[in-house]
Amino acid sequence: MTQAVITSLKNGHLKMIFPDLAENIPVYRFSSASNGLQKSLLPFRWESFKYLAGNYTKILIAGPLTANDQLVQGNNHLLNELVCLLLKKAASEIGSELHLVIDNNSFPEPSGFTSAPVKHTVTSVQKFHINEGLLRNREPAFLYFDWVNKSFRGVVQIKSQEHRHSFLAKGCPKPLLVLEEIQPGSNSGIQEFVIQGGILNKERSASSPDGRFIFLSEEDEDEDAPRMYTALLHFKPALPWLVYKCTQGPFHKLVMQQFGKSL
């Protein structure tokens, strides 16, 4: 059985909490600083979860996780839930067996226990319970796109061309954001978008941007209604950081809360 650990704890804290952890077991952390799939650091994207599920049969998730972004909306336990679901779906897609060991000890939130986050980056994670009929023959992201077009009609509209989706504001000649879907339809219930362009995106000219917007829907026999997770990860805003924290950042959080109420 090949084993690995996913954590956001510093090595010293990890060893203190898990003194019996073998030295040769690989330890991974999520971070946009990884610049692609590299040893010990992984960007938070579907490709990373397929890599983990394809190379290990047992994974310990140790402590609350972060994406190592500076601003976090939502709590780290939601990110843990999302990581577990993505690992399970990745293992199912590639046909591998994967045993997850989830540490349920009560640890403090990761602040002070992890490496310094990547400056001026954003994680925003939400979880919604939704009416079952809404997802019938529909992918989760398109519920969001349709809701934006209905709720902000005449102000902001999302124009879709095949797998590319542009957020357009009235009177603005350039898109606010551009999302491009990766491998559409490869896994039912998961949609991953690269934040490819837009004047609000600092990575608009990057050849391989880190920013991601992930939608995941999941039915659970233990819960009364299907769940939807939305996650903005490794986003790098173009606005000055303090301006973003007072304007676009809170607005995104409010928009996602209102979207959740519509479900």
Image: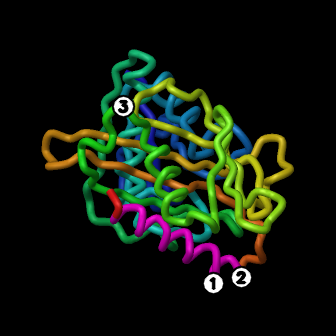
Q: If the image is split into quadrants, where does the N terminus sit?
A: top left
- The chief SS type of the magenta part is helix
Tag on residue 137?
Answer: 3
Q: Is residue 74 above or below residue 103?
A: below
Q: Tell me the residue at 58%/55% (across/down).
A: 233
Residue 127 visible here? yes
Marks 1 and 2, Cα distance to the nearest angstrom? 5 Å
Tell me which numbered mark, 3 or 1, is placed earlier along the sequence: 3
- Contact between labelled residues 1 and 3, with CB atoms less than 8 Å apart: no
Q: Nearer the viewer, residue 78 or 173?
A: 173
Cα–Cα gap, marks 3 and 1: 38 Å
At x 70% / y 58%, what residue is drawn? 168
Going by the numbered disc 2, the residue's amino acid type is Val
Does residue 259 show up magenta in the picture? yes
Image quadrant occupied by the C terminus: bottom left
- For residue 67, side relative to residue 258 (left or right): right
Q: Residue furthest front?
A: 154
Does dot 1 land on a helix, a strand or a loop? helix
Asked if marks 1 and 2 touch (Cβ < 8 Å), the reply is yes
The answer to whether residue 29 is magenta is: no
Q: Which residue: 61% across, 48% down?
A: 212
Of the pair 86 and 142, the residue shown nearer to us: 142
Q: Earlier in the sequence, mark 2 or mark 3?
A: 3
**The magenta stretch spans which residues?**
243-261
Label 2 sits on a secondary structure element that is helix
Q: Write down the residue under mark 2.
A: 243
For label 1, the residue is: 246
Residue at 70% across, 69% down: 120
